[in-house]
């Protein structure tokens, strides 16, 4: 709403209105801000929408996704330990080396894109 008022210029805050929506978690009572000209359009839950099913069913909330996340975290730690052994570096030196190399690659890619 703040951004909307700044861009419109000719309107101001005018309190809130109550809105009830149904979701995966049950009924939610929301306080939605409004402006004097009624030109503000909420983006997350649009006017007239009374249900927001599916927000709780995000793909990140499934057992399969969580198992994959844990497995890949273990793989990442294993790879870092292997790199530490291979290069005879401690954690901080390896981190600095990887960060430097990643920035170097990103810079080279940026230069390539600027030239294209």
Image (cartoon, rainbow, N blue to C red):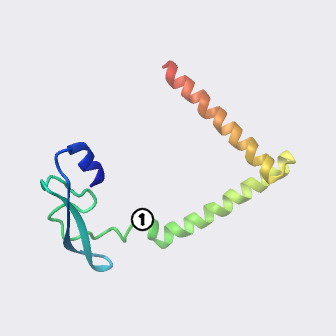
- Point 25% across, 49% down: residue: 4
With respect to residue 75, does 104 lie above or below? above
- Where is residue 76 drawn, in percent x and y? 67, 57
The residue nearer to you, when weighing 31 against 55, is 31
Q: Residue furthest right?
A: 88
Q: Nearer the viewer, residue 11 or 27?
A: 11
Q: Quadrant of residue 79?
A: bottom right
- Would you place residue 47 above or below residue 80 in this image? below
Q: Image point 56% across, 65% down: which residue?
A: 68
Q: Position of residue 71 (x, y in %)?
A: 62, 65
Residue lying furthest left in this view? 37
Residue beneath disc 1: 59
Q: Give the side of residue 95 with respect to residue 1, left or right.
A: right
Give the structural element (helix, strand or loop) at label 1: helix
Q: Is residue 108 above or below residue 18?
A: above
Most extreme residue toward the bottom is 26
Residue 80, image x, y percentages: 74, 53
Residue, x 26% and y 72% (percent of image)?
Answer: 30
Residue 24 placement, left or right of 75: left
Query: Closest to the observer: 30 or 78?
Result: 30
Disc 1 crowd, CA 10 A, few/some/many (<14, 14-19, 20+): few
- Residue 10, horizontal then vertical, whole percent: 16, 46
């Amino acid at each position: 709403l703040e951004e909307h008022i700044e861009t419109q210029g000719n309107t101001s805050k005018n309190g809130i209105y109550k809105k009830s929506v149904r979701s995966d978690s049950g009924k939610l009572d929301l306080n939605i801000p409004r402006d004097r000209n009624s030109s503000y359009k909420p983006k997350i839950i649009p006017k007239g929408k009374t249900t927001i099913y599916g927000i709780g069913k995000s793909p990140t909330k499934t057992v399969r996704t969580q198992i994959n996340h844990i497995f890949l975290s273990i793989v990442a730690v294993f790879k870092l330990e292997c790199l530490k052994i291979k290069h005879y570096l401690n954690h901080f030196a390896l981190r600095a080396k990887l960060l430097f190399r990643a920035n170097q690659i990103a810079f080279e890619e940026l230069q390539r894109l600027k030239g294209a």
